[in-house]
Image: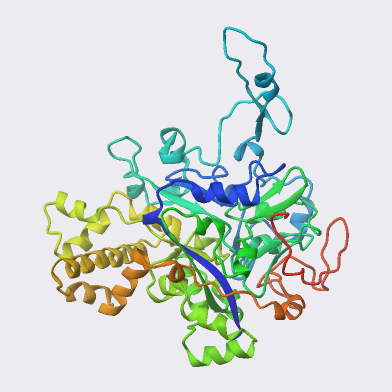
Amino acid sequence: MRPMTQVAMVMNLDKCIGCHTCSVTCKQTWTNRDGAEYVWFNNVETKPGIGYPKGYEDQRRWRGGWVLDRRGRLKLRSGGRVKRLLSLFANPHLPGIDDYYEPITYDYDTLLHAPAGPRSPTIRPKSALTGEDTAITWGANWEDDLGGAAEHAGGDPNIAAMPREAAERVRFSFEQTFMFHLPRICEHCLNPACVSACPSGALYKRSEDGIVLVDQDRCRGWRMCVSACPYKKVYLNHHTGKAEKCTFCFPRIEAGQPTVCAETCVGRLRYIGLVLYDADAVEAAASTPEPDQLLDAQRSVFLDPHDPEVIRAARAESIPEDWIDAAQRSPVYQLAIRDRVALPLHPEYRTLPMVWYIPPLSPVLDAVSDSGGDNADPDQVFHAIGDLRIPIEYLASLFTAGDADTVAGVLMKLSAMRGYMRARTLDGTISHDLLDATGMTAGEMEALYRLLAIAPYDERYVIPTAHREDAARLEGLDSGCSLDRPGGPGMGGAPNGTGYGPVDLPMPSPPPTRSGGGR
């Protein structure tokens, strides 16, 4: 056992109202500059929909993430070192500008210096890349609130992955449609494909908190990271020619403050905390043969911060005491591991993502009433879970690699929590049937309710401050991919410790303060 620390996030999708405040504040903080007009470290998508960039979840087209070879070993879906070297200058699996949107500007002089006349002057959008007139045909939130769903949402790869009977239930007519909002940032994976794919070794995963960043000095703009990332959360700044990505607002994290997107979230749907994981178990978890078992495999990597043996091992790895204490109070650990109501986004990509989601719960009591059932009967409530407006199979395609039973179990637990707290609040009764059905105690149920409904600021964000005195020690540690080692599946550097590309650079660990945002 080799404990390491990882800063992680959980988002409660029931609370997301699609206001895009997180996207705007992130944009103003990190990418409000030349070359990053189309770059959205945080974006909010409406599901069902093809997302941003277009169809990013279709890995048969984009070749992102990891797969297993014939011997059951991990390899990048985009190919090995030789294949990627041959496609260095002509990458067929790279999204084009039309898959994002063409950055635009306007000829403001036409407005400012137009002569007096009977009609108000107008201006047309112009491409920020070519300077020519262009049309606005796509954007980061083009599908907001199912805008254009009848035309585009049928191409959602998650619908294609559903069983045919379930897929036929997805309709886009006004009376039958459904939607929910999905905020997305970089997943800061335990096994990041982008880090392993970089020919220059510019991307690295910080050993002290697991945040994945880009060393702007070493980046050569090969864009292999863009192809390898299955979530398409690495971008190329067309002005600097460098890769940029979400930094998890690491300067704020080091100061014990939440990310900008979490700080400004109107719905208070984000939780940030520290988790301990066994670095020696990462490869085995990512190599789990069956995709629907990857969720349990990833959960098995996490360590119980209250276990005395884990605490001793963490101290032996020089993890500070206040960080161990933060891991014990972590809301991420409670939601994802202990209560098991949070799920990772597309675990089948085998990157072991560290931004998890609590799936949205449709109006389940209305579903019971519409069928003539009793809202107070837990058996009837649980039975209605399978008939909700949001198909469980669709959520399973997003969060559990198709395992609908796991999603149903999470929704049943959330529904039971609501029923339990409703009864307790109205007449003070304790619904033992609901507790028995979920296998939770009254204290655990009320603790889950508190965290999801009324938790204050310091319970939603449990972030220890960085230890500046350890900076010299951390600089000497390996900060590459968890599996990037001689003989391992990582492809980020040659076994002799050098990268390949236009120049042969030495590969010491980048300083922990280098920014992936170019700041």
Residue 477 sits above or below residue 391 on the image: below
Name the residue at the front extreme: 116
Horizontal placement of 18 versus 314: left or right?
left
Which one is in front, 113 or 289?
113
Viewer can see residue 283: yes
x and y percent of residue 462 in the render? 50, 72
Residue lying at 47% horizontally and 36% vertically, measured from the top left: 152
Query: In x, y percent, where is residue 82?
Result: 77, 59
What quarter of the picture does the N terminus occupy?
bottom right
The answer to whether 489 appears left or right of 18 in the picture is: right
| In the rendered image, the vertical position of residue 137 relative to residue 119, given as above or below | below
Report the number of numbered marks: 0
At a point 37% along the width and 73% down the height, the residue shown is 339
Residue at point 51% right, 45% down? Answer: 51
Q: Toward the viewer: 447 or 299?
A: 447
Q: Is residue 212 left or right of residue 415?
A: right
Q: Position of residue 479 (x, y in %)?
A: 71, 72
